Amino acid sequence: MLNELNNIFLDKVSVVVEEARKNVKTAVNIMMVYTYFEIGRMIVEEEQSGSNRAELIY
């Protein structure tokens, strides 16, 4: 009986840990997208030297 209760408890703990892992993955992915977007924005601003548009090169 005690062993069965321990298994149920450990199953519940396992579910909590798995949900936390999913949440961490989601949070990391969101931050990576934001970071890469910001880096891209910074590169564009640097290339444009503050202009609204990049210089056309023919």
Image (cartoon, grey):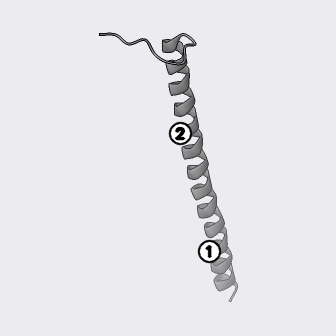
Mark 1 vs mark 2: in front: 2
Q: Secondary structure at mark 2?
A: helix
x, y percentage for residue 44? Answer: 50, 20
* In the rendered image, the vertical position of residue 36 relative to residue 16, given as above or below: above
What x and y, as percent, mark residue 24?
61, 51
Taking depth in this image into account, of 3 and 8 the one nearest to the observer is 8
Of the numbered discs 1 and 2, the one sitting upstream in the chain is 1
In the rendering, which numbered label is found on residue 11? 1
Name the mark on residue 36: none
Query: Total number of numbered labels?
Result: 2
Q: Residue at x 43, y 11 (%)?
A: 55
50 on left or right of 54:
right
* Residue extending furthest toward the left: 58
- Whether tag 1 and tag 2 are in contact, CB under 8 A, the answer is no
Looking at the picture, which amino acid does disc 2 mark? Val
Give the camera-side residue of 30 and 49: 49
Task: Tell me the CA gap for discs 1 and 2.
Answer: 33 Å
Picture residue at 61% right of the left edge, 63% below the top: 19
Tell me which residue sits at (55%, 13%) in the image: 51
Quarter holding residue 9: bottom right
Instruction: Check disc 1: other Cα within 10 Å, few if <14, some if 14-19, many if 20+.
Output: few
| Secondary element at image label 1 | helix
Task: Name the residue that disc number 2 marks.
Answer: 33
Q: x, y percentage for residue 48?
A: 50, 13
The amino acid beneath tag 1 is Asp
